[in-house]
Image (cartoon, rainbow, N blue to C red):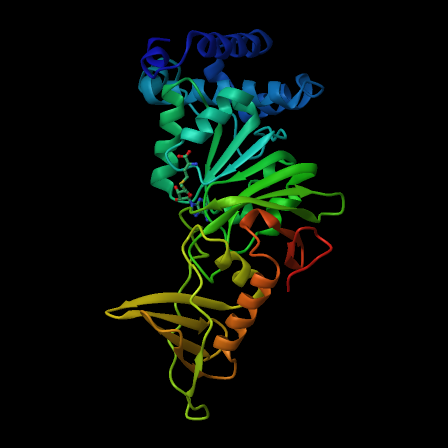
């Protein structure tokens, strides 16, 4: 008891755990350290069969914590007294998998996981973190405040299928591809909230998808944001070896360089319309060069804008004319009255994603 108080658990949480253990003990009729996996099977599978999933989860969590405590503090004594090696009777075969309200992907230090668990209850939150060291720390921090959401270490691309379906999936890293598992694990009518962007730029936009019957999801972008990018989806700049089949085309343009900052709307528009292209802006003593680079073939383009001059020099190379494609998107964006991030949206299904402007029946690409 004192150990749990010193770990920061509230009296209410400790009372709840003790209550769960007393119920199991009353049913078992012997010291709990005698429990075998077959006893836990019988209790969770038969006695609690008709109980709400939250009750099964909470009881098995209390049992697991109790066995962790016995193993850490009293393993040797118990073995000396009884000859038994203490082992938790809850394992991957009988651990209850109740559905949960919220899935948080990217636990980080555990702040948001703690807030969600406080609002929704421990039994209704699962959170996934790819970095095992961070995941472990993120278990300890909410625990110090008496909060115990289920914290899993792993790649969030898989979600956490054992506790489906979710009402909400909240993603706290920037994704470039939306894993279909996230939609499959959300109940129809549920929501997936994620920072999303394309490899065209480093900024993200907060996307709120509603999942429909049949597995399609659609929704608007809410505002520009910039998150740490999802591990395994980060951009690797291509290394192009020049191909003598192509020559560099030189031309000029009078189109000014649009704003391409992380929170500007135009990069989202370009990313939705121009596929497999990234960019960089190189500062120069007398201006800037916009570099465009294909992620699927050898094409690149560079446009150099000199301060105080209306005409920029353009060089293009490879099978695509990336400078012309970029300029066409810019004119399309101007013709549509410079729409902001919140005018765009996305529809996602098992085949991929489609961007739209103002409404899902007005696709942008
Ligand atoms: C901005 S932090 C999240 C902050 C957190 N929500 C909080 O409340 O403090 C992003 C986290 O996402 C994690 N992450 C990145 N890619 C991931 C992936 N593929 N699967 C799971 N977690 C990932 C990172 O390791 C990092 O800890």
Which residue shows up at 60% across the image and 28% down it? 96
Please state the horizontal and vertical placement of residue 43, each as a whole percent of the image. 62, 19
Residue beneath the point at 50% across and 51% down: 175
Quarter of the picture holding the C terminus = bottom right
Residue positioned most to the bottom: 245
The image quarter containing residue 212 is: top right
Q: Is residue 297 above or below residue 207?
A: below
What quarter of the picture does the N terminus occupy?
top left
Residue 284 drawn at (x, y percent): 26, 69
Q: Quadrant of residue 166?
A: top right
Q: Pick out the residue farthest to the left.
A: 285
Q: Residue 168 placed where, x, y %?
A: 60, 35
The picture places residue 60, in percent across and down from the top left corner, at 54, 22
Residue located farthest toward the right when viewing the structure as drawn: 213
Camera-side residue: 223 or 242? Answer: 223
Q: Front-most of 322 and 89?
A: 322
**Residue 217 located left or right of residue 301:** right
Q: Residue at x 40, y 31 (%)?
A: 110
Residue 88 appears in the rendering: no
Task: Tell me what residue is drawn at x 44 percent, y 17 percent.
Answer: 66
Q: In the figure, is residue 190 to the left or right of 285? A: right
Q: Is residue 126 above or below residue 334?
A: above
Residue 311 visible in the picture: yes
Residue 68 or 114: which is nearer the viewer?
A: 114
**Total marks in image:** 0
Quadrant of picture, ligand 1? top left
User: Residue 111, located in which quarter of the rendered image?
Assistant: top left
Answer above or below: position of 240 versus 343: below
């Amino acid at each position: 008891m004192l150990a749990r108080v010193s770990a920061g658990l509230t009296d209410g949480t400790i009372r709840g755990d003790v209550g769960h253990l007393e119920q199991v003990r009353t049913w078992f009729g012997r010291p709990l350290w005698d429990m075998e996996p077959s006893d836990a099977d019988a209790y969770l599978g038969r006695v609690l069969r008709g109980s709400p999933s939250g009750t099964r989860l909470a009881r098995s969590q209390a049992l697991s914590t109790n066995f962790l405590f016995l193993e850490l503090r009293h393993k040797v004594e118990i073995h000396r007294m009884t000859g038994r090696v203490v082992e938790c009777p809850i394992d991957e075969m009988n651990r209850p998998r109740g559905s949960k309200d919220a899935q948080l992907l990217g636990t980080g230090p555990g702040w948001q996981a703690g807030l969600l668990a406080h609002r929704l209850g421990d039994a209704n939150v699962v959170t996934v973190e790819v970095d095992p060291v961070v995941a472990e720390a993120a278990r300890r921090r909410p625990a110090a405040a008496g909060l115990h959401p289920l914290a899993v270490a792993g790649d969030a691309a898989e979600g956490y299928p054992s506790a489906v379906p979710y009402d909400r999936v909240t993603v706290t890293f920037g994704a470039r591809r939306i894993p279909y598992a996230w939609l499959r694990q959300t109940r129809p009518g549920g929501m997936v909230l994620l920072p999303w962007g394309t490899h065209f730029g480093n900024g993200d936009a907060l996307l709120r998808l509603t999942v429909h019957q049949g597995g399609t999801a659609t929704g608007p972008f809410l505002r520009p944001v910039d998150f740490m990018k999802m591990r395994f989806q980060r951009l690797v700049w291509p290394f192009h070896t020049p191909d003598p089949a192509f020559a560099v085309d030189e031309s000029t343009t009078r189109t000014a360089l649009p704003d391409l900052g992380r929170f500007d709307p135009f990069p989202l528009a370009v990313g939705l319309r121009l596929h497999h292209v990234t960019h960089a802006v190189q500062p120069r003593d007398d201006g800037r060069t916009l570099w465009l680079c294909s992620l699927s073939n050898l094409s690149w383009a560079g446009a150099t804008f000199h301060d105080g001059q209306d005409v920029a020099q353009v060089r293009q190379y490879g099978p695509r004319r990336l400078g012309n494609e970029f300029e066409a998107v810019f004119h399309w964006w101007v013709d549509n009255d410079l729409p902001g991030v919140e005018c765009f949206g996305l529809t996602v299904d098992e085949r991929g994603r489609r961007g739209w402007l103002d409404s899902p029946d007005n696709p942008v690409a």
